[in-house]
Amino acid sequence: MGETVPVLKGTVDLLILRALAAAATHGYGVMRWIEEATGAVIQVDEGSLYPALYRLEDRGWVTSDWGVSENNRRARFYSLTTAGRAQLKAESRDFLRFAAAMSQALQVARS
């Protein structure tokens, strides 16, 4: 595989919301989903992931409950709230507009 790229500020929350829209899971599951969904180009480490999960939970976009992982370990499982789904929709729309504008700007020929 190719090199990983640094995660842009503000995109970790969006990636986590998107991962949890796919399915409720524990933190390691979120990291795995992001890595798989991006072809391992984007990787989020624990030092960024867990503070973001706690922040999203404080904002009411994510909820969590204790459960048992596939490895028979106690783990905190995170899921998206209704407010989180709305936030995901809004942030996705805004990010896609931003990405399209950046792509357009980068393709403009210099005069």
Image: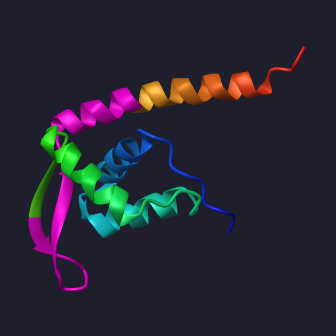
**Quadrant (top left/top right/bottom left/bottom right) for the N terminus:** bottom right
- Estimate the x, y position of residue 67 in percent, counting from the top left: 11, 71
Quarter-of-image position of residue 109: top right
Describe the colour scheme in one phrase.
rainbow
Q: Residue furthest front?
A: 47
Let me know if residue 69 appears in the view. yes
The image quadrant of residue 82 is top left
In the rendered structure, the answer to whether residue 103 lies left or right of residue 10 reads right
**Residue 37, position in %: x, y?**
50, 57
* x and y, in percent, of residue 65 in the image: 9, 61
Instruction: Give the x, y percent position of residue 5.
Output: 60, 54
Please state the extent of the stretch shown in magenta in the rendering.
66-91
Q: What's the residue at 32%, 45% (across, down)?
A: 17
Q: Is residue 54 magenta?
A: no
- Please identify the quarter of the rendering in which residue 56 is found: top left
Question: Measured along the vertical axis of the image, is residue 21 above or below residue 76?
Answer: above
